[in-house]
Image (cartoon, rainbow, N blue to C red):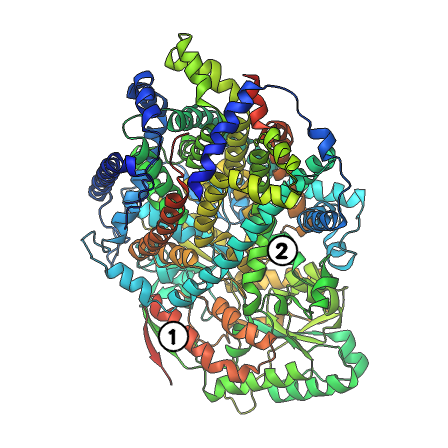
């Protein structure tokens, strides 16, 4: 029964809050990995990583090697160099322009998202106020609405305020990130004991002071989580900028990749002879995902840092 | 509307909290979000719902858009496709994501766990055009690194791999490949959130890893799992990207008009018929909401604390 | 919906709250409905403006840059124009050229129609069927009603304007042709002592011969989306008889269709007809080196043989498409070819028309630079001479290509629904699974009828 499991949660927090240290994790965990476990983890490792490895290698090949060579072989440095030259020559450095656009849109949206989402999720989880539940419901409802249908209304809305074609026409919709509000909401409601805040308030903290001094330092993991997911979602968003941005030099890299793809003869036989080759597309793809991977590596420490560990220190 | 679950047994603390946290503070914290929610969530959704009930000249059309959608020759098969896909997708997601997160969490070597999480996540960074190319090659036995596996299954050409009967598996594999890593990270973080003392206590009581997972860890992940299921159901019901990219990779042989959302997209942008497109979306929304309600009610998802 | 109450003590407050929530939610929805209604006033008509043909009214003309949308390949054309016409202000935007069902142009135009602004002045599209939606949407300007002189328009190849013509009015200019011919490997033909087939009967006989004498070699491929256009169109199969702006007659089971389907089946069965798409990795890896003949459009030469397959110089040759013996006039199919559209909303019609005329007719571009066979006949001559000077082909490709340019069967139209994707989704999986194409013809017909109806076509089935 769900109701039964919730009470222990509360108690865990209390217990943890009282006994801050002593974690016998290391000793108890050091057991030999069972072969089955190793096998499962390896199988999934191959499933997830081999296609990516293939893509990395694809960027080092010629189109011919891509089809005729061993799928998991390295091509040559000269082919990589050639692909690089061909890619950067495409509409004279368009790829860098796209990457820059993506960086601008995603970063601006990231800042707004965090500034808006974290307090909202916090308030939804830790405070009672009129309209809390309707807000949760409305958030869930709009999150479940199929996106393809929302694009046209969004376009008309953005047009009504004369923002079509501007940077804000994508940044503002990006900044609305209900998924992040829920992540924050669940995080605070499961991981941060209310007693901490009660103590802060007794100490005379204002509402905002309690949030800033107590909740925010504890929120590092969820800030990382929301920041990371929102950054990735915005970086990889295709459809919204595709519809909202009229000029090709405003495209973010995902839409740019789509343009490249439509110039690969194997995907679009009518492309003609000035076409893009598949290894170039692979290389462009790799350039496009590097920022995401860097952000992931940077935030992974926080993502899984042991959320409770933070709470107990507070 | 029973999304609004009732919080149990906390009336006392509730009253106490009211004193400390008057509504105003909460409103201050959520105000900027509410502005964005209305501007980019509620208004477009309302607009879309409005579309679903009006005809091309803007007059109220009753349910005619809905009947038009249902009467379309692709509707029934698309609905069946989505239902079958949802089954595969949800089962694989819940079982494998939770399972893999538990396995990773129990791993003794921290470095290996960290590396694996990163590698599992990798495909999540790929989207759109990249995936089209990757899957075109992965699914073609003549050039795929997994070609030997596909041939072992009796599939010698790309055409055989993407035969209509195989699509639910193929699409689930693509969706899982891109989507699972992010959820594994979330679940892993949530597992780290469980007090080691509690685990230790269970261990002292003689529970093995399996029992700890079943009795302690999984129940404590409940809210996260519910959230994942609700979202995964919504995402699965809105199936679009995977068949669309398969369609692109196969030059239209497989995946066109496969899902309801693709159908909605076709109505909107090919037939310039926003009303019917919105009707399909509203149907999807209602179904997803119904499922969300069930999960939310069963789990006390909206309870604060 | 049932309200499930978990804790008795909280029943009352719970109910109250859910009611409040419901009210709040409906309030929010009402608010959004008001906002939505507000949108109507500004937007005018909802379903895209339906401009009746012929009532073209010029927008107020003004100076200012000419906005041109082109795909990456046609970017060269726009840039060349800018270079040779430095005084014209151009705003060149590259997009995906509406390739492969992206519907980018249609999506954007329908949005611009709502906001009443934003349309480009001139657009290149890789699709031939843009007029099927662009004319009802009021986007394209009629070109032969005063904008371009009839004398200039007569330079286009016979039938080239078919995809652009709606009810006798020309709404776009054809960029290039994609008439089908028979590509073949001249070295192999000579080495094995084969005659290039002039009829489909000879073609089939040669296919049977190749199957026994040189197994593994190919006389064609039926695995493409283009199969209906290369084979069925050339065979005068009436699968796509567009009889009016929103009317189509579909008949895929006639003798003209089944004779070609049977031929394909025979050759698929003896493995001289590939089941893989010529654009697939599979084909490229295992079959591209074994092409004896390949019926296909004019652009196969440069894009496929020279570009993708890297077939060495001096091997590839062109012959006229085979014909059915007894057919009075030779007919060929057509696979693509781009079009240029002029916006009816353009405020720079003069500059736009100048550009449009230049880009479709000028030898500087069409004759020297363009990758495809120009639709404008004088430019095509220059283009062919240019091709000949490269000495890539084993024979003179000019005569068969020029002849085929005027032989595209006009019974196959350019509807809004894509015959390529219908074939790909209905016939190709069945063929891959081993079913004869003849047995799939009824399913093909049913699918065409369904798609045509859902696009609002009046469908007539049968001859």
Q: Chain of mark 2?
A: B
Q: Quadrant of the C terminus of chain C?
A: bottom left
Q: Residue at label 1?
A: C449
Residue furthest to the left: B59
Q: CA distance from mark 2 to mark 1?
A: 32 Å
Closer to us: C151 or C202: C202
Residue C86 appears in the rendering:
no
Q: Residue at x 23, y 50 (%)?
A: C45
Q: Secondary structure at mark 1?
A: helix
Q: Up-down: is A239 above or below C386?
A: above
Residue C43 falls in image quadrant = top left
Question: Is C5 on the left or on the right of C227, as rendered?
Answer: left
Residue B135, disc: 2
Q: Position of residue B128 (x, y in %)?
A: 55, 48
Q: Residues within 10 Å of mark 1 (few under 14, many from 20)?
A: many
Chain for mark 1?
C
Residue at 43 percent of width and 49 percent of height: B234
In percent of width and height, residue A9 lies at: 49, 32
Name the residue located 72 percent from the left edge and 85 percent from the top edge: C195
Q: Are marks 2 and 1 on the same chain?
A: no
Residue B157 spot, x, y in % from top left: 67, 68
Find residue B20 and report its image quarter.
Answer: top left
Hey, which residue is sitting farthest front in the picture?
A: B205
Q: Is residue A98 left or right of residue C422?
A: right
Q: Is residue C114 left or right of residue C428?
A: left
Which residue is nearer to you in this view: C123 or C286?
C286
Residue A34 is labelled as: none
* Residue depth check, mark 2 versus mark 1: number of the one nearer the observer: 2
Identify the residue at image location x=43%, y=52%. Answer: B238
Image x and y of residue A152, in percent = 35, 45
* Residue at the bottom extreme, as displayed: C326
């Amino acid at each position: 029964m769900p109701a039964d499991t919730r009470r222990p949660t509360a108690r865990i927090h209390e217990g943890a809050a009282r006994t801050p240290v002593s974690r016998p994790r290391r000793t108890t965990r050091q057991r030999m990995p069972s072969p089955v476990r190793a096998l499962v983890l390896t199988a999934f490792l191959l499933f997830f990583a081999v296609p990516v490895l293939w893509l990395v290698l694809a960027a080092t090949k010629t189109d011919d090697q891509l089809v005729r060579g061993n799928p998991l072989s390295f091509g040559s440095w000269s082919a990589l160099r050639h692909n690089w030259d061909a890619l950067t020559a495409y509409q004279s450095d368009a790829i860098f322009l796209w990457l820059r656009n993506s960086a601008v849109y995603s970063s601006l949206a990231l800042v707004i998202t965090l500034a808006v989402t974290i307090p909202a999720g916090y308030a939804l989880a830790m405070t009672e106020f009129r309209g809390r539940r309707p807000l949760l419901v409305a958030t869930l409802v709009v999150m479940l609405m199929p996106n393809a249908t929302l694009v046209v209304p969004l376009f008309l809305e953005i047009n009504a305020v004369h923002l079509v074609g501007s940077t804000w026409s994508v940044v503002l919709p990006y900044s609305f990130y209900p998924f992040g509000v829920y992540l924050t909401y669940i995080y605070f409601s499961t991981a941060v004991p209310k007693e901490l805040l009660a103590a802060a308030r007794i100490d005379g903290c204002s509402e905002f002071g309690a949030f800033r001094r107590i909740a925010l330092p504890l929120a590092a993991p969820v800030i990382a989580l929301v920041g990371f997911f929102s950054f990735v979602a915005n970086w990889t968003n295709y459809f919204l900028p595709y519809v909202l941005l009229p000029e090709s030099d405003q495209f973010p890299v995902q839409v740019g990749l789509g343009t490249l793809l439509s110039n690969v003869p194997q995907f679009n036989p009518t492309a003609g002879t000035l076409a893009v080759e598949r290894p170039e597309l692979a290389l462009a793809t790799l350039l496009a995902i590097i920022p995401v991977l860097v952000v992931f590596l940077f935030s992974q420490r926080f993502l899984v840092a042991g959320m409770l560990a933070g709470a107990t220190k507070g | 509307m029973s999304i609004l679950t009732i919080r149990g047994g906390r009336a006392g603390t509730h009253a106490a909290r009211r004193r400390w946290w008057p509504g105003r503070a909460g409103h201050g914290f959520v105000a900027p979000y509410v502005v964005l929610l209305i501007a980019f969530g509620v208004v477009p959704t309302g607009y879309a719902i409005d579309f679903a009930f009006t005809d091309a000249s803007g007059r109220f059309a009753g349910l005619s858009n809905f009947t038009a959608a249902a009467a379309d020759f692709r509707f029934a098969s698309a609905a069946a496709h989505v239902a079958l896909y949802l089954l595969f997708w949800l089962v694989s997601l819940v079982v494998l994501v939770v399972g893999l997160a538990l396995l990773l969490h129990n791993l003794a070597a921290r470095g290996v766990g960290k590396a694996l999480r990163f590698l599992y996540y990798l495909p999540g960074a790929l989207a759109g055009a990249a995936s089209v190319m990757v899957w075109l090659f992965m699914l073609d036995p003549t050039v795929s690194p997994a070609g030997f596996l596909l041939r072992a299954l009796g599939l010698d050409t790309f055409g055989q791999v993407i035969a209509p009967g195989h699509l639910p598996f193929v699409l689930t594999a693509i969706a899982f490949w891109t989507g699972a890593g992010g959820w594994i990270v979330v679940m892993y973080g949530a597992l780290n959130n469980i007090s080691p003392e509690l685990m230790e206590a269970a261990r002292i009581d003689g529970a093995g890893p399996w029992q700890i997972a079943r009795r302690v860890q999984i129940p404590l992940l409940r809210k996260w799992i519910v959230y994942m299921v609700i979202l995964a159901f919504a995402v699965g019901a809105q199936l679009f990207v995977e068949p669309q990219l398969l369609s692109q990779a196969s030059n239209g042989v497989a995946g066109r008009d496969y899902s309801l959302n693709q159908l909605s997209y076709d109505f909107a942008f090919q037939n310039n018929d926003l009303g019917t497109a919105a009707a399909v979306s509203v149907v999807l929304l209602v179904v997803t909401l119904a499922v969300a309600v069930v999960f939310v009610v069963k789990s006390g998802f909206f309870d604060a604390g | 919906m049932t309200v499930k109450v978990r804790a008795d003590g909280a029943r009352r407050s719970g109910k109250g709250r859910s009611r409040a929530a419901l009210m709040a939610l409906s309030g929010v929805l009402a608010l959004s409905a008001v906002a939505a209604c507000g949108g109507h006033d500004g937007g005018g008509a909802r379903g895209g403006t339906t401009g009746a043909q012929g009532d073209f009214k010029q927008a107020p003309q003004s100076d200012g840059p000419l906005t041109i949308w082109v795909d990456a390949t046609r970017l060269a054309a726009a840039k060349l124009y800018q270079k040779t016409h430095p005084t014209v202000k151009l705003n060149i935007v590259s997009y995906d050229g509406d390739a492969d069902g992206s519907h980018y142009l249609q999506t954007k135009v329908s949005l611009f129609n709502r906001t009443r602004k934003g349309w480009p002045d001139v657009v290149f599209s890789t699709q031939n069927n843009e007029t099927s939606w662009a004319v009802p949407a009021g986007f394209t300007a009629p070109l032969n009603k005063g904008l371009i002189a009839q004398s200039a328009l007569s330079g286009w190849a016979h039938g080239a304007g078919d995809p652009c013509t709606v009810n006798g009015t020309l709404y776009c200019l054809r960029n290039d042709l994609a008439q089908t011919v028979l590509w073949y490997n001249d070295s192999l033909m000579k080495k094995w002592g084969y005659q290039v087939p002039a009829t489909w009967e000879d073609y089939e006989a040669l296919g049977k011969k190749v199957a026994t004498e040189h197994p593994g070699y190919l006389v064609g491929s039926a695995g493409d989306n283009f199969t209906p256009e290369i084979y069925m169109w050339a065979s005068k199969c009436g699968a796509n008889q567009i009889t009016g702006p929103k009317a189509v007659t579909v008949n895929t089971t006639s003798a003209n269709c089944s004779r070609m389907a049977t031929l394909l089946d025979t050759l698929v069965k003896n493995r001289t007809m590939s089941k893989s798409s010529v654009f697939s990795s599979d084909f490229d890896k295992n079959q591209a080196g074994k092409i004896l003949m390949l019926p296909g459009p004019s652009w196969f030469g440069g894009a496929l043989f020279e570009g993708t397959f890297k077939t060495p110089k001096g091997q590839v040759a062109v012959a006229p498409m085979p014909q059915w013996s007894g057919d009075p006039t030779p007919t060929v199919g057509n696979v693509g070819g781009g079009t240029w559209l002029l916006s009816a909303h353009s405020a720079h019609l003069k500059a736009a028309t100048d550009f449009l005329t230049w880009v479709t007719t000028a030898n500087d571009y069409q004759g020297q630079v363009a990758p495809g066979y120009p639709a404008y006949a004088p430019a095509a001559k220059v283009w062919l001479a240019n091709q000949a000077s490269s000495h890539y082909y084993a024979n003179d490709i000019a005569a068969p290509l020029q002849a085929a340019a005027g032989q595209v069967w006009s019974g196959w139209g350019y509807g809004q629904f894509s015959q390529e994707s219908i074939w790909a989704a209905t016939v190709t999986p069945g063929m891959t699974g081993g079913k004869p194409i003849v047995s799939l013809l009824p399913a093909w017909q049913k699918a065409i009828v369904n798609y045509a109806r859902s696009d609002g076509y009046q469908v007539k089935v049968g001859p």
